[in-house]
């Protein structure tokens, strides 16, 4: 279909206006201001690879981004990880949100005021659109899971932590 200049200009002006309201972020904000300024947020259909040598904080960065997107922006995120359990990931998020160490959390050694603080802050995490899959999947199963999450849960961001499944399928 051929589009005329008038409709194209009107649509462009609408987009520019929407972008001015969202500080120029046209995609999903990562929660890292400088990164979002450079990328305009994560854009639909993009494949972003974040990599680094061991110990450089790539996993911590990715988990912070997942937390920011799911909790702060209330956007649906799916995390696929065969390197750590879902319990491990959620414990790290709880620690990040509450400021309590994973050592204290895992041992249940919290003061009454810390239990109270944790319970107050976890409501947002509990109700966030975050989905974690921590079992090994074949490529076809991974594809099916992603398709279901996008269709049924409106997932916008898929994060994979070192997938090690059978990619030969």
Image: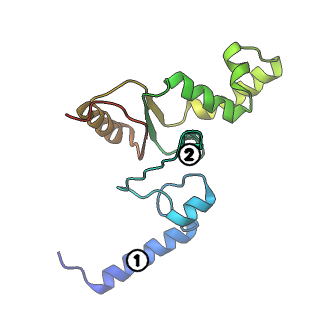
Q: List the single residue furthest toward the bottom.
A: 5
The answer to whether the residue labelled 1 contacts the one labelled 2, judged by CB atoms less than 8 Å apart, is: no
Residue 100's spot in the image, x, y percent? 74, 28
Quadrant containing the N terminus is bottom left
* Residue 132 in view: yes
Colouring = rainbow
> Mark 1 highlights which residue?
12
**SS for dot 1:** helix
* Residue 25 in view: no
Residue 97 falls in image quadrant = top right
Nearer to the camera, 82 or 30: 82
Nearer to the camera, 57 or 19: 57
Q: Residues within 10 Å of mark 1 (few under 14, many from 20)?
A: few
Q: CA distance from mark 1 to mark 2?
A: 30 Å
Residue 106's spot in the image, x, y percent? 66, 17
Q: Vertically, is 39 above or below 12?
A: above
Residue 32's spot in the image, x, y percent? 61, 54
**SS for dot 2:** helix
> Mark 2 highlights which residue?
65
Residue 131 as seen in the image, left or right of residue 23: left
The residue drawn where x is 30% and y is 36% is: 148
The residue drawn where x is 56% and y is 45% is: 65
């Amino acid at each position: 279909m051929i589009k005329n200049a008038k409709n194209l200009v009107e649509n462009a002006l609408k987009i520019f206006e929407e972008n001015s309201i969202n500080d120029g972020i046209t995609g999903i904000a990562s929660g890292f201001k400088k990164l979002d300024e450079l990328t305009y947020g994560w854009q639909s259909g993009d494949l972003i690879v974040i990599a680094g040598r061991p110990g450089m904080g790539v996993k911590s960065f990715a988990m912070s981004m997942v937390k920011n997107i799911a909790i702060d922006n209330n956007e649906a995120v799916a995390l696929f990880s065969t390197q750590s359990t879902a319990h491990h990931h959620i414990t790290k998020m709880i620690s990040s949100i509450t400021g309590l160490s994973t050592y204290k959390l895992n041992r249940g050694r919290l003061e009454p005021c810390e239990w109270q603080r944790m319970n107050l802050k976890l409501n947002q995490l509990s109700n966030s659109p975050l989905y974690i899959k921590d079992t090994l999947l074949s490529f076809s199963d991974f594809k099916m899971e992603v398709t279901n999450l996008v269709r049924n849960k409106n997932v916008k961001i898929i994060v994979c932590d070192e997938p090690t499944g059978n990619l030969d399928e």
